[in-house]
Amino acid sequence: IIFIGMIPEGNLSTYRHTTRGQCFAELRRELGEVLGHASEIWGMTGLAQKLIPHRIWLNMHKTCRVHTAAEALRFAPLLSTGATIVSELCYYKDQEEYGGLVQFVPWEHLASTLNRTMHEARALDSVANLAGRSTRSQLFMRRFNPS
């Protein structure tokens, strides 16, 4: 399981909401070392290098536990390759738009959903895994028609 994005040093927030760093640390305590972090990935080549060993991608907002807009710029390259994305809840219209492509769950169920998704992915053979990725990729391409 990997999260792509910045996790600032320290956990101080100028907002009244919990910061991404605090939330990542909380998930890391629950999930352990299976939860990784990658930042400074530039372009499809960098993404492809990171994508190969990971089956599941985590999406967290800058201020987690707040239902903000979906990180569409993060979703698009992942979904175009058929990646499995588990996200905390987003703005309801974004959840509708990405329904069937991204698994949206309340924060309190995020760790258990990631754990279950990881175990399900491990149980699938490589052919079934590739078929699932292909289906997600094709659905994304039809729905959003990226060029």
Image: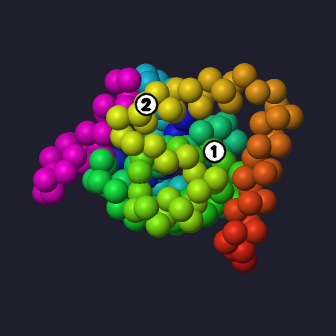
Is residue 46 among what the camera can see?
A: no
The amino acid type of the residue labelled 2 equals Ala
* Image quarter of the C terminus: bottom right
Which segment is the magenta one? Answer: 8-30
Q: Which mark is residue 84?
A: 1
**Residue 145 shows in this picture:** yes
Residue 9 lies in magenta, yes or no? yes
Task: Give the vertical position of 81 relative to 115 (above or below).
Answer: below
- The location of residue 69, given as percent across then percent down, is 40, 65
Residue 112 or residue 8, whichever sits in front: 112
Say the numbered circle drawn on residue 111.
Answer: 2
Pick whichever of labels 2 and 1 is earlier in the sequence.
Answer: 1
Tell me what residue is drawn at x 31 percent, y 31 percent: 26
- Residue in the picture at 34% in, 24% down: 29
Q: Is residue 123 above or below residue 80?
A: above
| Quarter occupied by residue 24 | top left
In the depicted view, which residue is nearer to us: 92 or 80? 92
Q: Residue at x 22, y 46 (%)?
A: 18
Secondary structure of the residue carrying tag 2 is helix
Q: Is residue 14 left or right of residue 4?
A: left
Check the picture and name the quadrant holding the N terminus. Answer: top right
Instruction: Pinpoint residue 127: horizontal percent, then vertical percent.
Output: 86, 34
Q: Locate residue 62: give its quadrant.
A: bottom left
Percent position (x, y) of residue 85?
A: 57, 47
Horizontally, is 16 left or right of 82 in the view? Answer: left
Q: In the image, is residue 122 above or below residue 87? A: above
Q: Amino acid at mark 1?
A: Thr
Please state if 14 lies on the left or on the right of 87 as rendered. Answer: left
How many C-alpha atoms fall within 10 Å of the one at disc 2: few (<14), some, or many (≥20)?
many
Calculate the distance from the C-alpha at mark 2 to the C-alpha at mark 1. 15 Å
Task: Report crowding for label 1: few under 14, some 14 to 19, many 20 or more residues within 10 A (C-alpha).
Answer: many
